[in-house]
Image (tube, grey):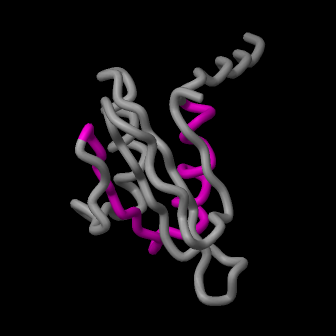
Amino acid sequence: MAPRKPQPKTPEELFLQPLAELAAQNPEIEALVFWGDDSGWSALPSEALESEEVTFWAEGLIPEGFRIEWRVMAGPDGTSPDHIRLYAWESGEAPPEPEAKPLARARWPE
């Protein structure tokens, strides 16, 4: 029997793939979760997720219609990942621009 071809990744999987890869490479990395709404964004995160929780958290919100943005933020050296910031909202403005430039970022839906 010939090997089966891998199924193409869904757009959701492609959106989250960089986070899954980062978590696999750096299992100690954490994600800070921020929620937004019509009244704006809190400066403080509502929770912190461990690396293995990040993609599951986002996968659960995407089908519910939430908008999500993730940002990989640099550590003190400016080049290695320090933490992830996850932003979720249904209404209102997108999250504010960060003071420090993220190493990587993406938004769902684009």
Residue 11 sits above or below residue 87 on the image: above
Q: Is residue 80 left or right of residue 54?
A: right
Residue drawn at x 60%, y 65% is 25
Q: Is residue 103 left or right of residue 63?
A: right
Q: How many marks?
A: 0
**Residue 53 on image: x %, y %:** 35, 53
Q: Is residue 81 left or right of residue 65?
A: right
Q: Nearer the viewer, residue 24 or 86?
A: 86
Residue drawn at x 23%, y 45% is 39
**Residue 3 on image: x %, y %:** 74, 18
Q: Residue furthest bottom?
A: 76
**In which quadrant is the C terminus drawn?**
top right
Q: Nearer the viewer, residue 29 or 70?
A: 70
User: Would you identify the image quadrant in which residue 55 lies?
Assistant: top left
Residue drawn at x 41%, y 68% is 30
Residue 58 sits above or below residue 74 on the image: above
Q: Residue furthest front?
A: 39
Q: Residue furthest right?
A: 2
**Residue 69 on image: x %, y %:** 49, 44
Residue drawn at x 40%, y 63% is 31
**In which quadrant is the N terminus drawn?**
top right
Residue 9 sits above or below residue 83 on the image: above
* Residue 57: in magenta span: no
Q: Is residue 108 left or right of residue 11?
A: left
Magenta span: 13-38
Q: Nearer the viewer, residue 100 or 20?
A: 100
Residue 63 sits above or below residue 20 on the image: above
* Residue 17: in magenta span: yes
